[in-house]
Every structure is written in C-alpha cells, then in structure tokens.
C-alpha cells in the first residue's frame, strides 16, 4: 500500500509553532507512538459492530500508508455508551496511549475527553457535534458550520446574496439554522429571514405559505433547507414549487447531502438545487482501496479513522516531541484525508475542503471543485 495515491501526509509546513504547548502529550520520536482507537463495538446494536470494524479497518489502512512513522494502534470497545467510553479512555491512557481516536457518539466522546483531560490527553472524536468541541476534545465529523460557510460563500460569489433559512423545529434543524445564520454573517451575505416548521407532515404543509410569503417580502435569492431525505426534504421540494416558489426563481440550497440516498436524485423538486460534498474522485478512490483490502465498502464515516491516523502520522513524521499537542494538531496547513483536505481549529471544530454540486437530469454534477489547499492560517 506504500505506493498508493492516497497518502497520510501533511500538506505543508506547520503554520503554528508546535512547541507552544497547550493540551497534549509529548512523545518519543524514536519509538512507535501508542494510539488508542475507541470504537462502538460491544453494544446491542448490530450496526455499531459494523461501524466499529470499518473504523478499525480504515485506521489500519492509513497506518499501512505511512512512511517513516510507526503507530502502535490499540483498539478499545465503548459499546456506544458514555460510561464504558470513559472507562475505556482511562484504561487506554493507563496502558500508555498518547492520543485517543474516537469515540463516535457525542456523549461518549465528551465522557472520554473529560475523563482524560487531567492527564493532558487529546481526543480526536468521530462526532460532528460541535457543542462538545473544545479543550482537549476535537471533532473530526463533517459539521453544519463548515457546509453552511462553503455554500453561502459560493452563493454570494454567484449573485445569490439574499439567503433565507427554512428549518425544522427540532435540535438538528435549530443547529442547522444557527450554522446558516452564522455563515451569512461571516460571508457578508444578506439574511432574507428564517422560517421554522413543526417536524411533522402537518407542520411542513402549514409552513409552506409562510415560507413563500417571507421569501417574497424579503427578496430572497436563495432558500437554504436544513432537512434531509428522511425528514422534510421530499415534501418541501414538492410543495414549494407547487406554491410558486422553485429553484428556477429562488435557488434551493441543501445543508445535507442530496445524493444520499441515491433515490433523492429522482425528486423533481431537487433538480437544479445546490449542496456540498467531499471530492467524489477521492471518495471513490478510498472506497475502491478499502473494498480491495477488506472485501466490502466502508461505513459512510469509516474514513474518519483514516483521517485521524493521517493527521497523527504526518505530525509525528516531523520528529517533534510536541507533535500531538493542540498547537500542532491545529496547524493551519491542514492534512490530506480520504475525502480531501481538512484541518482542526483551535475551538475543537474542523474545516474540510468541499465541492459544490447541483442535480441535473437526476445526476450529480460538480459545479465548483473542492479546494486542494487552504488559504490562510485557519487559526
């Protein structure tokens, strides 16, 4: 696997001085680095076992790609449970782990990071819950904030300056709406209002007239929807055009992936809509290599374990004893992962290089490729 196109390598020289310690352990530069991988195996949910195996496989694939770096990977089960995750994290550190990859679920990740904070251990969790991020806890999962910023910036650059948010009145929808609102402010776009709806079929139907009225009154150029296919997306993209509000007149934008599941591409109302996704070529490449090595496709978030090892390996290769401190982990140049470039931020969140896609004739078409490097330090 050494010659594979994917490489667990740092993109550029660190933009921050890794010798300025914050959180994190010093390591030996001449011995294998002990890394703990916390996976949700051991729970009563059969899906957790599949996810756990995919994460472990992806981590091993990344280790095989490293050159000049030795990683001593130790795998611990969390059963998807905060108390078990806490105990596993403590055991991992007692057994010498210098950094922890995982767990997956937000509460378990928070419990693990809290348990080892006093021992100065950084945790790179697979969660996408930014509310738990900070201190010694980083989230590797794709975030609403990252997606919203990418899409709002693209919309503004393409003449869609007045952006309206349509969100479900549940935790996911409200977090999505906040991310959209923050992105509008950060990118210098104009807020064209926000309309929430009760998370039910009746709630969506009842909100359609208010969504249309708000869009017209506020001269919305774009309608940013937080819902996914298993939520209100199919109904909204049917009813809004029927009410006279369609992507032909007001650009529809999705906070979630509109190509998952593939049946979403068949919906008439999503045609012409925009959404963000990782570089498809790199994703296909990883899936192909994974299948060749393990005989099946990885779990959708399995690649996060590869990313974690890629970042650790790239930093360890520098030969600096402070390679796993927070100041090193958050260096601005970022890292190359299975889905493209990514970097960790000092607040514990992450930024990922995303492509912008549209749907034409029921097919995904990339209209703005994912960046291959970051501009600016990202601090």
Image (tube, grey):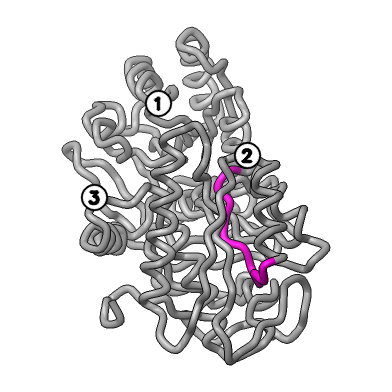
Q: Nearer the viewer, mark 2 or mark 3?
A: 2
Quadrant of the image occupied by residue 328: bottom right
Task: Please say whether residue 368 is visible from this viewpoint.
Answer: yes
Residue 158 appears in the figure: no
Q: Nearer the viewer, residue 122 or 263?
A: 122
Q: Residue at x 64, y 87 (%)?
A: 28
Residue 81 is labelled as 2
Q: Kindly report the secondary structure that dominates the magenta region of the rendered protein.
A: loop
Determine which of the numbered discs, if any, sits on residue 230 in the image: 1
Q: Secondary structure at mark 1?
A: loop
**Foreground mark, 1 or 2?**
2
Q: Is residue 119 above or below residue 232?
A: below
Earlier in the chain: of badge 1 and badge 2, it is 2
Q: Look at the image and give the residue range highlighted in magenta.
A: 95-105
Magenta stretch contains residue 331: no
Q: Are marks 1 and 3 in contact (CB under 8 Å)?
A: no
| Location of residue 373 (image quadrant) | bottom left
Callout 3: 10 Å neighbours few (<14), some, many (20+)? some
Give 179 or 155, whichever is nearer the viewer: 179
Mark 1–mark 3 Cα distance, whole angstroms, equals 22 Å
Q: CA distance from mark 2 to mark 3?
A: 40 Å
The C terminus lies in which quarter of the figure? bottom right
């Amino acid at each position: 696997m050494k010659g594979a196109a994917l490489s667990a390598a740092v993109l550029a020289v660190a933009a921050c001085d890794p010798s300025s310690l914050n959180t994190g352990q010093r390591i030996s530069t001449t011995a294998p680095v002990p890394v703990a991988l916390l996976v949700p195996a051991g729970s009563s949910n059969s899906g957790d076992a599949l996810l756990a195996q995919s994460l472990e496989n992806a981590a091993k694939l990344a280790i095989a790609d490293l050159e000049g770096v030795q990683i001593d990977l130790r795998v611990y089960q969390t059963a998807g449970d905060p108390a078990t995750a806490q105990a596993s994290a403590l055991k991992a550190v007692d057994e010498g782990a210098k950094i922890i990859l995982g767990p997956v679920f937000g509460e378990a990740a928070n419990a693990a990071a809290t348990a080892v904070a006093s021992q100065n251990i950084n945790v790179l969790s697979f969660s996408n819950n930014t509310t738990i991020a900070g201190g010694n806890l980083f989230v590797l999962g794709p975030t609403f904030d990252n997606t919203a910023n990418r899409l709002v910036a693209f919309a503004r650059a393409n003449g869609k300056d007045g952006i309206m948010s349509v969100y479900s009145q549940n935790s996911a929808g409200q977090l999505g709406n906040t991310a959209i609102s923050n992105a509008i402010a950060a990118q210098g776009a104009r807020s064209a209002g926000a309309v929430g709806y009760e998370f039910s079929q009746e709630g969506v139907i009842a909100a359609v007239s208010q969504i249309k009225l708000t869009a017209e009154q506020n001269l919305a150029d774009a309608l940013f929807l937080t819902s996914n296919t298993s939520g209100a997306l199919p109904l909204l993209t049917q009813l809004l055009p029927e009410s006279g509000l369609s992507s032909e007149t007001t650009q529809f934008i999705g906070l979630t992936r509109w190509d998952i599941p593939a049946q979403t591409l068949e919906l008439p109302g999503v045609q012409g809509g925009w959404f963000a996704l990782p570089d498809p070529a790199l994703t296909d490449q990883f899936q192909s290599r994974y299948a060749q090595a393990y005989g099946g496709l990885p779990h959708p978030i399995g690649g996060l374990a590869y990313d974690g090892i890629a970042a650790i390996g790239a930093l360890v290769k520098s030969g600096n004893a402070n390679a796993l401190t927070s100041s090193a982990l958050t260096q601005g140049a970022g890292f190359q992962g299975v889905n493209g470039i990514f970097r960790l931020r000092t607040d514990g969140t992450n930024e990922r290089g995303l492509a912008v896609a549209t749907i034409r004739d029921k097919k995904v078409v990339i209209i703005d490729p994912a960046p291959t490097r970051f501009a600016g330090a990202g601090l």
